[in-house]
Amino acid sequence: MTDLARATSILTIDVEAIVANWRLMAKGVAPAEAGAVVKADCYGLGMGHIAPALYAAGCRTFFVANVDEGLALRKILADGMIYVLSGPPPGSEPDFAAHGLSPVLNSLSQIAGWSAFARASRAAPAAAIHIDTGMSRLGLDEAELDRLAAHPEVLAGVRPVLVMSHLACADEGESPKNAEQLGTFRRLAARLPAMPMSLAASFGAFLGRNYHFDLVRPGVALYGVNPTPGRPSPMAQVVRLQGKILQVRDVDRPMTVGYGATHRVTRRGRIATVAIGYADGWFRSLGGRGFGLIEGIKVPVVGRISMDLTTFDVTEVPPTVVHAGAMMELIGPSHSVEDVADEAGTISYEILTALGRRHHRRWIGVPAEGKHA
């Protein structure tokens, strides 16, 4: 039996669409550079397949969350700039140097540690400096930046090649916070030596050219999420999730469905049990709120979602197309990641990164294997 025949759920990932989305972003922000945020295994979709394709398309700057992600990416890409957003934990500096990883320095202590290592090793990679313009998360605040500006010798050996910040409300285009952070970024960055600047990620790239500076850091938009809320998405769809129907049963009142007997049957109908659950990233909160599609017909989730199984009311679907072995579409062209996120009461980022490892994965447009340089 083939892997596909054994599969009870199928996650199809269109790498060609991801590349097309990056090219669209790159064209839209030119002459600024478009990098790629590939942290969290490319938002759960597979860095080993996606990063080489982005590199082959012309992307040369990548962002990961931590050192281990950087090391994993460097095994895939022999060339290219890899920024580690969390910066260097004390003692990890030699790993950065040995594998050509560039830290994003988020605090005075990280700057001091990297500076000491750089002076001692004389072979440290270039770094980025992160300034906080209103997120109150990572980055130098204004007081710390004043201290750094008063002691420029601290930057000796650091070789900063990028100053960056992050927008808090870029997904809310009308928020005054965006313009406030833009002004703060310009003002605070001016206290550092002149270097390339980066402020916008996926949503920020669509706020206008004032936000582009020298480098834009698209992430979730590459993976098909709409970066223009309230308007048609300019991005190509990337993922399709299907679950296999294991059983179809006739039901009638006063029967109940699922744990806790939360769904009470009120009429004669049919229930399809699909082999997908919260262990597969199909959130428990979708119980009684989510949907699937069969032959383009929308069918509601009924009852609680369990670890491995979800039940759908398929009463309105012709019995000829609802049977054991048939596939139900859970994410796809007619039911987007954003739709599922809305139904689950969460955000698209969480839906993507939660998709588990139990799905059979199919890849569209995967480049030849091997290290890319």
Image (cartoon, rainbow, N blue to C red):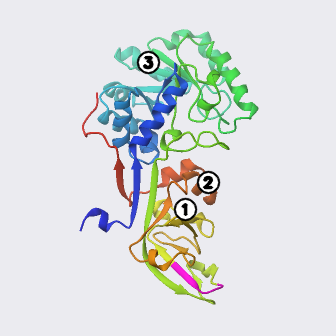
Q: Which residues are magenta?
A: 266-271
Q: Earlier in the sequence, mark 1 or mark 2?
A: 1
Compared with 356, 127 (above or below) is: above
Q: Nearer the viewer, mark 3 or mark 2?
A: 2
Q: Check the image and name the residue furthest to the right.
A: 176
In percent of width and height, residue 13 lies at: 40, 49
Identify the secondary structure beneath mark 1.
loop
Above or below residue 145? Residue 268 is: below
Rounded to the nearest angstrom, the CA distance separating label 3 from label 1 is: 46 Å
Q: Are marks 1 and 2 in contact (CB under 8 Å)?
A: yes
Q: Nearer the viewer, residue 242 or 231?
A: 231
Label 2 Cα neighbours within 10 Å, binned few <14 / some 14-19 / many ≥20:
some
Lower position in the chain sequence, tag 3 or tag 1: 3
Q: Residue at x 53, y 53 (%)?
A: 351
Query: Tag 3: Cα neighbours inside 10 Å, few (<14), some, or many (≥20)?
Result: some
Q: Residues within 10 Å of mark 1 (few under 14, many from 20)?
A: many
Q: Which residue is mark 2?
A: 346
Type of the residue with mark 1: Phe
Mark 2 residue element: loop
Dot 3 corresponds to which residue? 116
- Residue 270 locus on image (x, y percent): 54, 82
Q: Amino acid at mark 3?
A: Ala
How far apart marks 1 and 2 lie (CA) works out to 10 Å
Q: Which corner quadrant of the image does residue 228 belong to? A: top right
Q: For marks 3 and 2, give the CA distance.
A: 43 Å
- To which residue does mark 1 refer? 283
Q: Is residue 224 left or right of residue 268?
A: left
